[in-house]
Image (tube, rainbow, N blue to C red):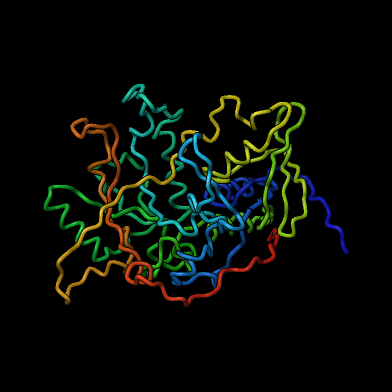
């Protein structure tokens, strides 16, 4: 047997290759640093994508399987935690951007100063951001153009100033979107095209999304969806300075005597353990896995977990909160809604986004028309048994271009 060698030290090791990790990898490798990326999930290819509802919605093809990568949940510390598919963000190269709906409206100026606007709210921990929208705006613009987005500048009357428009035009309205626009107009409210993490026309060698209904929760077999899998990761690999290792589970962040991170301990796809030393460690595991790793990284210097001197690591977390209502419509057979067809998040409104004290609470939300779900999961009480079998583990691979 050939004994595997411990990896050579690098400038930066990044835990995770999703939205944050891939972005950091692109920026740092393009700046000339030698970077290693460690991703817990597999590196999928375009042929793994399809419109198979059972495969992606019911069989954990890109989501973590609770049998092999369990997460536990409890509503409070008085009950025992149970294994559940809680916040099932995909653990794959590209992370949540492989399945996301791609809504990318900019934050409002008020979002950066909530405590200044609303003070101390009982039961909450509002704080102002340490930066303002004005300071962030150039980076919003850079990401929109590097990542590939669609939208219509100026269409949202509530939007703050922007230095540049969107690189591609808005996506066409679905039948549901047109119905929503008509209803909102009758009620005196405005709508605008939802800014999307997608390209709607040829852009930087990518082809536009086909406008089918298999978007949210499905990987894209083409190049229309702006996932880091097809944008920032290829950019980083092209530098020759980004070594991305998939199917690698990081269990600890290592620190030196001075308390500074020196690297990470991880297992590869075969279960063999390695230490990757680096001058800097960046943790981009998402809202659940990042706190988990910090809390697991205990030492004499950090007995409660790395960076947890305040005891707040892992607290005040919010996971994709939303409310929805289902409406029934009387439609002629010749004019159906096609509730599962087209890009369903093509329109939205900010008219209820800002605080309005008359509603009895602070803050608000954007609203948009969604879809009813695809036919297999929505229409049939007994789900059929066809679909490709769940993915079996594959060997990971490492590449430096």
Q: How many marks?
A: 0
Q: Residue 313: image x %, image y %?
A: 55, 33
Q: Name the residue located 52 percent from the left edge and 56 percent from the top edge.
A: 90
Q: Is residue 24 above or below residue 44?
A: above
Q: Quadrant of residue 398 in the image?
A: bottom right
Which quadrant of the structure image shows residue 108? top left
Q: Quadrant of the C terminus?
A: bottom right
Q: Residue at x 42, y 27 (%)?
A: 125
> As rendered, which of 314 and 194 lies closer to the eye?
314
Give the x, y percent position of residue 83. Answer: 54, 50
Percent coordinates x, y for residue 306 in the rendering = 64, 32
Residue at the right extreme of this rendering = 1
Coordinates of residue 21 in the picture (x, y in percent): 58, 48
At x 49%, y 34%, the residue is: 78
Q: Is residue 217 visible?
A: yes
For image coordinates 29% across by 51% down, the residue present is: 324
Q: Is residue 94 visible?
A: no
Answer above or below: position of 286 versus 385: above
In the displayed structure, 352 sits above or below 384; it is: above
Task: Classify the position of the N terminus by image quarter.
Answer: bottom right
Dividing the picture into quarters, in which one does residue 124 lie? top left
Q: Is residue 347 left or right of residue 232?
A: left
Is residue 127 shown left or right of residue 188?
right
- Front residue of 9/261: it is 261
Q: Is residue 256 left or right of residue 342?
A: right
């Amino acid at each position: 047997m050939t004994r595997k060698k411990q990896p050579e030290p690098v400038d930066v090791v990044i835990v995770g290759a999703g939205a944050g990790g891939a972005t950091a990898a692109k920026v740092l490798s393009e700046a000339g640093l030698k970077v290693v990326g460690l991703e817990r999930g597999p590196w999928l290819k375009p042929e793994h994508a399809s419109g198979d509802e059972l495969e992606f919605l019911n069989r954990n093809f890109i989501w973590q399987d609770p049998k092999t990568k369990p997460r536990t949940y409890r509503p409070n510390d008085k009950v025992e935690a149970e294994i559940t598919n809680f916040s099932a963000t995909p653990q794959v190269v590209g992370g949540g951007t492989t399945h996301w709906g791609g809504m990318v409206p900019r934050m409002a100026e008020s979002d950066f100063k909530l405590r200044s606007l609303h003070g101390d709210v009982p039961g909450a921990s509002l704080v102002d951001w340490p930066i303002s929208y004005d300071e962030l705006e150039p980076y919003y613009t850079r990401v929109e153009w590097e990542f590939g987005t669609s939208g219509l500048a100026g269409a949202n009357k509530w939007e703050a100033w922007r230095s540049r428009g969107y690189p591609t035009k808005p996506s066409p309205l679905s039948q549901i979107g047109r119905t929503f626009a008509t209803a909102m107009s009758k009620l005196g409210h405005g709508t605008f095209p939802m800014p999307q993490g997608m390209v709607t026309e040829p852009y930087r060698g990518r082809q536009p999304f086909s406008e089918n209904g298999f978007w949210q929760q499905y990987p894209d077999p083409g190049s229309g969806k702006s996932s880091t899998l097809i944008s920032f990761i290829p950019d980083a690999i092209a530098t020759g300075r980004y070594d991305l290792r998939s199917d690698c589970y990081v269990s600890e962040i290592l620190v030196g005597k001075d308390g500074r991170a020196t690297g990470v301990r991880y297992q590869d796809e075969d279960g063999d353990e390695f230490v990757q030393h680096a001058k800097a460690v960046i943790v981009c595991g998402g809202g659940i896995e990042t706190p988990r790793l910090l809390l697991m990284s205990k030492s004499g210097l950090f007995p409660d977990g790395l960076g947890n001197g305040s005891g707040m690591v892992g607290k005040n977390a919010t996971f994709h909160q939303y409310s929805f209502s289902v409406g029934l419509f009387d439609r002629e057979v010749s004019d159906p809604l096609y509730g599962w067809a087209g890009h369903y998040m093509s329109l939205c409104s900010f008219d209820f986004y800002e605080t309005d004290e008359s509603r009895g609470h602070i803050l608000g939300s954007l609203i948009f028309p969604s879809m009813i779900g695809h036919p297999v999961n929505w229409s049939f009480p007994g789900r059929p048994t066809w679909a490709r079998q769940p993915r079996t583990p594959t060997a990971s691979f490492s590449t430096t271009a």
